[in-house]
Image (cartoon, rainbow, N blue to C red):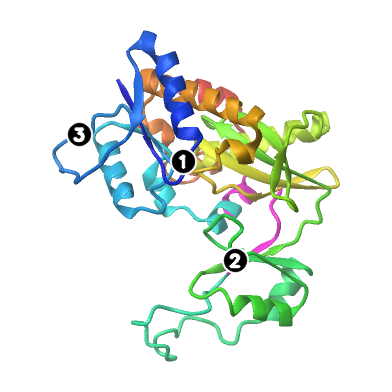
């Protein structure tokens, strides 16, 4: 059985991951390599039992090839269908309904549009104009954070204190739909590496210096337990098995502010040697388990089931996320 790794400009993680999978997988007849695509035939299944995807969000051809791979039974981490459809604003809404602490958030129309949209009242007749900027700031509070509704890497993220600053920042965001979010004046901040939905590793993250710190007693037992529980709930609801989830902690309450990171940073020089070794080991064990036991249906989101809507409308109780994953 083959494990394929799909990556972009990464240097330390790919060789270390492939080497470790080959070591651990040898007794099971499992090997790993860089996944290769060069024109995907619709009736030809890929040669991989599992593919780890860390670049299809930037190379659209790969996303199409991965969907085709799922159709032929390949287990893809992360699910390319859900990743294509997902966005941060929807995620905030889902997780607020599931009981996680989420800052107040508003979805905004984009500042500008593609050239083939005629910017006339008829073309945009469904948009309210002018936008009630003061009212939106009243809702989320001041200061607030303006950031893309689907994005990452701290791009187009602005802290604003009033309408003037909000509009100045907003004018620089075309053509991206944005969110306006309550600012959490946090006293602690963690990023959680997640593997297989419920295996959670909270890590101290210094937002100002944008670096990870190895500090194992950073959170109180109570706060740490809630961080892990909420991270498990997020991944189970959204189907992600390789992710980072960010919590801004204010007065002991961990607010989930970012959890659409399905291709998290795994580079040694940024996540520290300690966590790099941890990530390589966890990811290698994850893909071997999925190669031996995985069913692609495991990777689908479960928010409908967890909210008790759709075909599972009879579901009314809470779930134990760890027990849920073990039963799959």
Please state the extent of the stretch shown in magenta in the rendering.
93-107
Q: Position of residue 152 (x, y in %)?
A: 56, 55
Q: Would residue 193 be found to the left or right of residue 226 on screen?
A: left
> Few, some or many C-alpha atoms within 10 Å of disc 3 (few <14, some 14-19, many ≥20)?
some
Position above or below: 227 against 123: above
Q: Nearer the viewer, residue 300 or 313?
A: 300
What is the quadrant of the N terminus in the image?
Answer: top left
- Label 1: state its secondary structure: loop
Question: Viewer-nearest of labels 3 and 1?
Answer: 3
Residue marked by disc 2: 156
Q: Nearer the viewer, residue 281 or 106?
A: 281
Which of pointers 1 and 2 lies earlier in the amino acid sequence?
Answer: 2
Residue marked by disc 1: 301
Inspect the magenta stretch and tell me whether residue 174 lies in it: no
Q: How many marks?
A: 3
Q: Would residue 207 be found to the left or right of residue 54 on screen?
A: right
> Few, some or many C-alpha atoms within 10 Å of disc 1 (few <14, some 14-19, many ≥20)?
some
């Amino acid at each position: 059985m083959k494990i394929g790794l799909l990556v972009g400009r990464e240097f330390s993680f790919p060789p270390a991951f492939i080497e470790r999978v080959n070591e651990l997988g040898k007794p099971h007849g499992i090997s790993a390599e860089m996944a290769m695509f060069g024109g995907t035939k619709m009736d030809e299944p890929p040669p991989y039992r599992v593919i780890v995807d860390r670049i299809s969000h930037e190379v659209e051809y790969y996303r199409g090839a991965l969907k085709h791979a799922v159709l032929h039974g390949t287990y893809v981490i992360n699910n390319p269908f859900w990743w294509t459809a997902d966005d941060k604003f929807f995620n905030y809404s889902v997780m607020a309904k599931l009981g996680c602490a989420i800052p107040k958030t508003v979805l905004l129309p984009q500042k500008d549009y593609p050239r083939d949209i005629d910017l006339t009242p008829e073309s945009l007749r469904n948009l309210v104009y002018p936008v009630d900027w003061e009212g939106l700031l009243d809702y989320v509070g001041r200061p607030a954070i303006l950031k893309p509704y689907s994005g990452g890497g701290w791009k187009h993220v602005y802290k604003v204190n009033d309408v003037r600053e909000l509009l100045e920042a907003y004018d620089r965001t075309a053509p991206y739909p944005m969110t306006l979010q309550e600012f959490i004046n946090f006293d602690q901040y963690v990023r959680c590496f997640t593997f297989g939905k419920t295996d959670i590793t909270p890590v101290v993250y210094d937002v100002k210096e944008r670096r990870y710190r190895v500090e194992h007693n950073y959170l109180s037992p109570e706060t740490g337990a809630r961080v892990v529980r909420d991270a498990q709930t997020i991944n189970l609801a959204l189907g992600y098995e390789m992710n980072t989830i960010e919590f801004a902690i204010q007065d002991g309450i961990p607010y989930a502010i970012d959890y659409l990171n399905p291709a998290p940073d795994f580079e040694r020089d940024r996540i520290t040697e300690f966590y790099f070794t941890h990530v390589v080991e966890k990811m290698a064990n994850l893909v071997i388990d999925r190669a031996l036991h995985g069913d692609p249906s495991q990777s689908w989101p479960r928010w409908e089931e967890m909210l008790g809507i759709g075909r599972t409308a009879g579901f009314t109780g809470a779930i134990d996320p760890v027990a849920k994953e073990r039963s799959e």
